[in-house]
Image (cartoon, grey):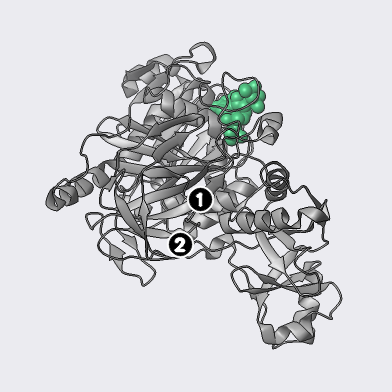
């Protein structure tokens, strides 16, 4: 699946043309969903359709399945989850699809948000029985803020669930987007016969295969044939579809790209129903890799010289290698392995000798990559999350913000003689963005406060401090629930308040931590002029 062959030294004119042409073929997206909605199952089903894998179960990392996504941490194995995120690339028709994986665990982490800075569209996967769930909504907020078009997939239609029309109301009420179904289910949830293709008026009938292990056969029938075969179920689907039409719930490409509407598909990832429709819709409607704004708001065109930004750094994926991978999203030009690019943060050259595509355990060398592609740079010790890389024309992309932490813990070395290792480890985790690190004179350098969006980040930090830096730590949770950004001037007045503590974050921001929202309200009342800005929550992400 890797594009190879162009080699270093191609003429610049040709490279620009290549970049534009290849960017137009790229569809780079992520699946956003609440745990258990079926993201891993859908990923497999998509790969199966694209014939990346021969059988469902080859990618999924859950315990008991055929193989695991990553075994970079014992913790992952024990829980049967995948923390590492990467991109799966596959060809479909004439397009190249990049599915950027969001970490699938129940706890939220900053990585989950960061991944969304690397995609051009998102698939919002909704469990038909559960409707819109909290994590889906949080991730949706990031998409909304970034203006990423969202395609909605109602999954698990093979199981009893809510009514289709009710689900549409929920999508509209919770996201503010007008749902514009492209397909409509024939048969209620739990009795899935197929879908009415609202654009052709025809019926796509699905046939079960054993456990959904292979691509489900589809039969295309006309409306008359569907009526004959499905009777009541077909009539109901047509009536509901007409109702939607009367309410104006019809796809409009401009409104979709403007983030006003969301096309909706119905499916069952586990049975491989509706998966081809999703791929087709991605190709047809989702935006290709396009120009990207830099920190000054100037758009970098896809055919400009090579540029990329790092959206994720991960170390310790493979205990045998102790490697460190920086994932970059190519924004413009052609990336050629072995070329020397400039690291915008330092102005220094960066040699890209080792470039890989990573998905799960599989790693393949990437020789050439184009706008929209995700490339893992191996042993990229100099690179940090948010860093820009370029050739010829300098560019700095907007930073990926730190998100508002909601969990806090004091971190101490178990063995004080390991202080050096402790400090190095903490610094490293901070740079990678595994956790945010907060410090104060009062607590001292030996007891920094780790702050996280999701508590899983603490477990990762703890495991890596012990395993990688030989500095086992204790983490004592602090009773704070929320943080606000303040300024140095206000620290002296805020710090003495009960249930409040001010600390300095690694990026130079002063954070005031509050035990609960009530205390924040009280402080705001007592000190009405105090600077207490909401932190960059997911919804405020400028990236
Ligand atoms: P996640 O990555 O979003 O967390 O979800 P995952 O794909 O792991 O799916 C969660 C559970 O939902 C799995 O069941 C999976 O088989 C099931 N599932 C996914 N899509 C569908 C669907 O379309 N229909 C039905 N009926 N089930 C679906 P599990 O019991 O937790 O795991 P397993 O024993 O099936 O592996």
Residue drawn at x 65%, y 60% as measured from the top left: 436
Q: Residues within 10 Å of mark 2 (few under 14, many from 20)?
A: many
| Residue drawn 54% across the image and 56% down it | 141
Give the side of residue 325 with respect to residue 337, left or right. Answer: right
Q: Is residue 328 visible?
A: yes
Which of the numbered marks, if any, corresponds to residue 543?
2
Q: Quadrant of ligand 1?
A: top right
- Which is in the foreground here, disc 1 or disc 2? 1
Assign the N terminus to one quadrant of the image.
top left
How crowded pointer 1 is (Cα within 10 Å; few <14, some 14-19, many 20+) is rated as many
Q: Residue furthest right?
A: 498
350 shown above or below 531: above
Q: Position of residue 124 (x, y in %)?
A: 50, 43
Q: Position of residue 131 (x, y in %)?
A: 60, 41
Residue furthest out toward the top: 210
Q: Nearer the viewer, residue 445 or 266?
A: 445
SS under mark 1: strand
Residue 274 showing in the rendered view: no
The residue carrying mark 1 is 312
Position of residue 57 relative to residue 460, above or below, is above
């Amino acid at each position: 699946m890797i594009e190879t062959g162009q080699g270093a030294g191609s003429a610049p004119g040709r490279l620009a043309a290549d970049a534009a042409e290849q960017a137009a073929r790229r569809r780079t997206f992520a699946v956003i969903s609440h745990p258990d909605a079926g993201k891993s199952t859908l990923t497999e089903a998509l790969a199966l359709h694209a014939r990346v894998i021969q059988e469902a179960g080859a990618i999924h990392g859950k315990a008991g399945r055929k193989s695991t996504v990553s075994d970079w941490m014992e913790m992952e194995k024990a829980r049967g989850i995948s923390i590492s995120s990467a991109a799966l690339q596959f060809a479909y028709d004439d397009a190249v699809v990049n599915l950027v994986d969001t970490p699938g665990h129940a706890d939220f982490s900053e990585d989950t948000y960061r991944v969304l800075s690397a995609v051009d569209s998102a698939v919002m996967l909704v469990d038909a029985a559960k409707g819109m769930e909290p994590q889906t909504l949080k991730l949706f907020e990031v998409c909304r803020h970034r203006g990423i078009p969202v395609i909605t997939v109602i999954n698990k239609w093979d199981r009893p669930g809510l009514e289709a029309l009710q689900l549409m109301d929920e999508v509209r009420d919770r996201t503010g987007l007008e749902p514009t179904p492209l397909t409509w289910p024939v048969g209620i949830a739990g009795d899935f016969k197929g879908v009415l293709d609202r654009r052709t008026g025809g019926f796509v009938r699905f046939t079960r295969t054993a456990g959904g292990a292979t691509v489900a056969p589809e039969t295309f029938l006309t409306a008359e044939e569907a009526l004959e075969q499905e009777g009541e179920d077909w009539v109901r689907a047509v009536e509901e579809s007409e109702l939607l039409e009367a309410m104006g719930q019809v796809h409009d490409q401009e409104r979709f790209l403007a983030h006003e509407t969301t096309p909706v598909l119905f499916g069952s990832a586990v049975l491989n129903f509706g998966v081809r429709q999703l791929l087709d819709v991605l190709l047809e409607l989702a935006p290709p890799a396009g120009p990207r704004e830099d920190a000054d708001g100037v758009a970098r065109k896809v055919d400009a010289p090579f540029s990329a930004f790092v959206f994720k750094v991960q170390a310790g994926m493979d205990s045998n290698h102790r490697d460190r991978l920086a994932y970059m999203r190519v924004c413009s030009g052609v990336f050629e392995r072995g070329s020397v690019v400039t690291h915008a943060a330092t102005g220094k050259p960066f040699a890209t000798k080792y470039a890989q595509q990573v998905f799960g355990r599989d790693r393949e060398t990437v020789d050439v990559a184009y706008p929209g592609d995700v490339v893992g740079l191996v042993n990229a010790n100099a690179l940090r999350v948010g860093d820009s890389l370029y050739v010829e024309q300098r560019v700095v992309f907007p930073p990926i913000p730190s998100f508002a932490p909601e969990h806090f813990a004091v971190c101490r070395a178990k063995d004080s003689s390991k202080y050096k290792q402790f400090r190095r480890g903490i610094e490293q985790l901070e740079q990678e963005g595994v956790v945010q690190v907060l410090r104060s004179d009062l607590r001292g350098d030996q007891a920094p406060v780790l702050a996280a969006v999701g508590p899983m980040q603490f477990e990762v930090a703890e495991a890596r401090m012990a395993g990688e830096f030989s500095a086992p730590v204790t983490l004592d949770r602090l009773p704070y629930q929320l943080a606000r950004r303040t300024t140095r001037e206000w620290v002296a007045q805020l710090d003495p308040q009960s249930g409040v503590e001010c600390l300095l974050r690694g990026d130079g921001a002063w954070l005031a931590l509050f035990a609960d929202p009530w205390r924040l309200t009280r402080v705001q009342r007592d000190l009405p002029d105090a600077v207490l800005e909401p932190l960059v929550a997911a919804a405020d992400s400028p990236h």
